[in-house]
Image (cartoon, coloured by chain):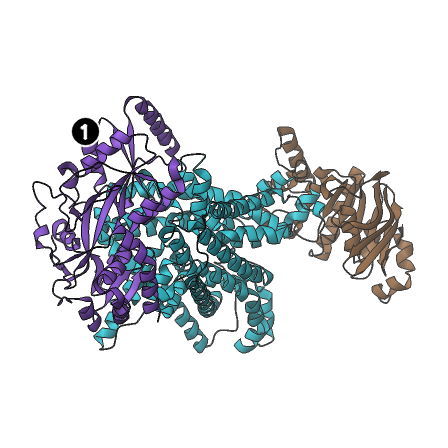
Amino acid sequence: MKYLTFAAGLLSATTALAEVPTLTVYTYDSFTAEWGPGPQVEKAFEEVCGCYLKLVAAGDGAALLARLKLEGARTEADIVLGLDTNLVQAARDSGLFAPHAVTAEYDLPIEWSDANFVPYDWGYFAFVQSRDLAAPTSFRALADSDLKIVIQDPRSSTPGLGLLMWVKAAYGDEAPAIWEGLADNIVTVTKGWSEAYGLFLDGEADLVLSYTTSPAYHLIAEEDDSKTAAPFDEGHYMQVEVAGKLAATDQPELADQFLQFMVTDAFQSVLPTTNWMYPAVTPEAGLPAGFETLIQPAKALLFSPEEAAELRDPALTEWLTALSR
Amino acid sequence: MADRAQPVSGAAGVGAAAFVAALILGTLAAVALRAEPGKGLGPADWQALRFTLMQAALSAVFSVALAVPVARALARRRFPGRAALITLLGAPFILPVIVAVLGLLAVFGRAGWVSQALGAVGLEPLRIYGLHGVVLAHVFFNLPLATRLILQGWQEIPAERFRLAAQLGAGPGAIWRLLERPMLARVAPGALAVVFAICLSSFAVALTLGGGPRATTVELAIYQAFHFDFDLGRAALLSCIQIALTVIAASLALRARPGGGFGAGLDRPVQRWDANTTGLRLLDTGAIALAALFLLLPLAAIALSGLPGLPQLPLSVFRAAATSVLIALGSTAILLLLAVPMAATVALARHALWVELAGLLGLAVSPLVIGIGLFVVIYPLADPFALALPVTALVNAVMALPFALRILVPRAQAVIGDYGRLGASLNMGGGPFLRLVLLPRMRAQIGFAAGLGAALSMGDLGVIALFADTEVATLPLQIYRLMGAYRMEAAAGAALLLLVLSMLAFWIFDRGGRWHAEA
Amino acid sequence: MLRLEDAVIRNGEFTVRADWAVDGGARVAVIGPSGAGKTTLIEAIAGFRPLERGRILWDGRDITGDAPGKRPVAMLFQDGNLFPHLTVAENAGLGLRPDLRLNAEQKARVRAALTRVGLAGLEDRKPGALSGGQQSRAALARVLLQDRPLLLLDEPFAALGPALKVEMLDLVAALAEETGATLLMISHDPDDARRIADQAILVAVGTAHPPQPTAALLDNPPPALRDYLGET
């Protein structure tokens, strides 16, 4: 039966190909989920492009890039959507991406200009906790406290790598000392965000590494205002999620059109309550009610892709050394 | 026995084994060939290897040591619900990792039931995270398997021996020396090696319960090599090390091979005359009760946390469940097509060691590496997405093959030993012997193997992640996706659905094998 | 005629030598001390044990290399002569077609054979639902249907009571008579041998001796056989 469905799909895709072009976008899993931005974005773009938008899910951001490298220039992808700043340099080095021509007034806390990659949303990493807990105000305060945290492994998880960069950006050469101080607060390190957040919700830890926007989910989707994020004095590291056009695309115009569409209201207004991140360009109607309750970090931290690529391996070694004692 | 004196040929089994070996070693080679110059193995990798070996060894020792009293208790006690308990105790083995870990932590975690009970009487919560936590989790997963392997050993001691011992007035101590210790010396190495091999490829369990990067395993290093560094050469190299370790462990296990695996006759306690003292009764009752509590409480936790989520399951979860069932059926069919001929070939003692080793490769290979390898091989030829279902079914079958063989081989040996000559003297060809003798005589074991294969396939994330299109998500993948979208309650509901479906698949096949089975 | 030509059969540490012939239609007992190689000899003739040297011929045709099922041999083992999951009719039917694809005529022959051995009406029973004697009869029905010129018995009735055993041996003798088959049967009981077999092969000290009249052999046993038989 599945085979029939597949054959029918193939058939319709072939006939469709003759009439309307298809734009293939590789993205991460949660983007294409029925509760993610994918379905709405697909509908909105297909209304204006006269094309089929084919969203292909491939794990997380790192898996996305790995897969693209496996496929090389023969990839069917026209667009890759879902890399973050920690992956941008590696993506650039692959030589698979083409320059873009998108212009937009980004509402990012930092300046953004990149020849290949267009940002579509962003967020701050933060420790999420229960509102009735006295929030730690910095990594040092956290390290000195008895609070228990659960974090993700930087080798297998995007937020985990973000935390590595966060400590490095805030403390530079003192990062190893911070990690050593945190060691007795860390309940455990998980493979991915889901495990960590699940453990936190089950009460295994007082705080979990996530995003400042996480409480918005509980507030808006579950009408539960018991969660908040701890604002840290040293500032919060950012995650900026970007998309880029493949150099080998057979739909260069459509790809350009999609990247430009990505920074318009139709796309951006979907993101806050599906991806639970800040849109790169705030929609005209503003952010959904509830987002105003989120903490606003005093300082945004972010390494350039070049710096991030350079710092990654030494920072990982420091982390491993500090936590393996 | 001369070759010509057997009714079945070993050719099909050798072919199946060659196919499995080619699949696994071929994909590994594909990854290695695709590799660009990398940085090779670093000190962190060797550290990971040391930790992997240590936790696998400890997990194996504890799983088997604890399985001995449980198996002995199950071997010499009859009580209502014994068969159901043995089936249910198998559940942890087929659970998806993330579900099992959350269930375990609901019981043994800092905020778990045990810690809450300790807190109520003013005691510190359990400290579960660390090497002991890793071992605890692996014992949770593997105690049922070890118990079944050892229970089988007990039941292979002929009833006449116990009768003789009873007639001689041998007490428990004498029986231990005369019968049980020699049996364990034969069975335990195999059980140790199997659990050791399973724990070699642990990743998320070891990391999460290990409490940090100290608990880095080779499988995590492989994941890191691929995702973090895109160093395919290192991934292939690490995978080779994993395979080498498994093959070494497996060779030891096969050398110390018990007469049987964990197939037949689990519902048939041996009549015993020696263990009727009150002390031994209490000991056995305690062993069974503790094992049942240890294994069933986390399952209860999964069920409890899943119930509220059941009503809010989105339609996509049921679609994913249907996909998983479909894959499980396909995977089970492939599994039997591979395992039955291979078991027959091993039973004929024809190229037995090679066929067994090929079968064990499924335990040894990293699912990630086999996924990448298949992707590299398939990509130039066809659309990997279009092949997501068959590829997943195939890989799941290969991963379940080692267990299926352990179930099928002893029975195939017994059937061919008992009836091979009769079949040969009646001039039965391979086909009629298979149809009229081997398959009917192995029905219960085939059902058991099929049930285990279907359940393992249901719970396995395997390679689907790399191949999955949005439409062909499996249930485990859908659970991860729900969790990734904050929808923990729905994810817990889906996990309960998965648990129920897996157990159901196991139960249906297992029962089907025994339905109207004679003699 | 069955001929063993300069045959040497190895079973682990010891060997059995044989160089003789048995006439077609003869009924021969194989006797001798335990462990002397009676079963080894029978297994070699049935094709379950290769010859180290020499040949086995049936009616002048060399069958040394033939698979067990391709030999002109029907054999009953000490145990395990029936498949417990198949019915009596199916077990017997295997003697006609080992793949059990029987046509109406063949099914009728199966019924007739079962009637001949006294199992009419029990066609659909499984072996587990039969008595020991009935199980033996079912196996004999299959032998009848196999219709092979050489019948080998490795003490298939050893577990039966004395009266039943005699009854079965008589049935075997009658069947062999009817079909004209040559019979080779291992026996531990001199009375059985006298009753059924006109000739006997003595297996002792690594040699299977040529067949000789049973009565003469038992009345005047050589030393090896005398020790085995005891006071006689």
In the image, the chain rendered in cyan is B
- In the foreground, A96 or B153: A96
- In the foreground, B127 or A274: A274
Type of the residue with mark 1: Glu
State the residue position of label 1: A47
Instruction: Provide residue B490's location: percent of width, then percent of height.
Output: 23, 50
The quadrant of the image that shows the N terminus of chain A is: top left
Q: Quadrant of residue C95?
A: top right
Q: Colour of chain C?
A: brown
Q: Quadrant of residue B109?
A: bottom left
| Residue C73 left/right relative to B120 | right
Q: Vertically, is C199 above or below C228?
A: above
Identify the secondary structure beneath mark 1: helix
On the question of residue B110 being in view, the answer is no
Q: Vertically, is B255 above or below B1?
A: below
Instruction: Provide residue A181's location: percent of width, then percent of height.
Output: 25, 71
- In the foreground, A154 or C206: A154
Name the residue at 61% across, 38% down.
B431
Q: Colour of chain A?
A: purple
Instruction: Provide residue C107's location: percent of width, then percent of height.
Output: 63, 33
Name the residue at 62% across, 29% down.
C104
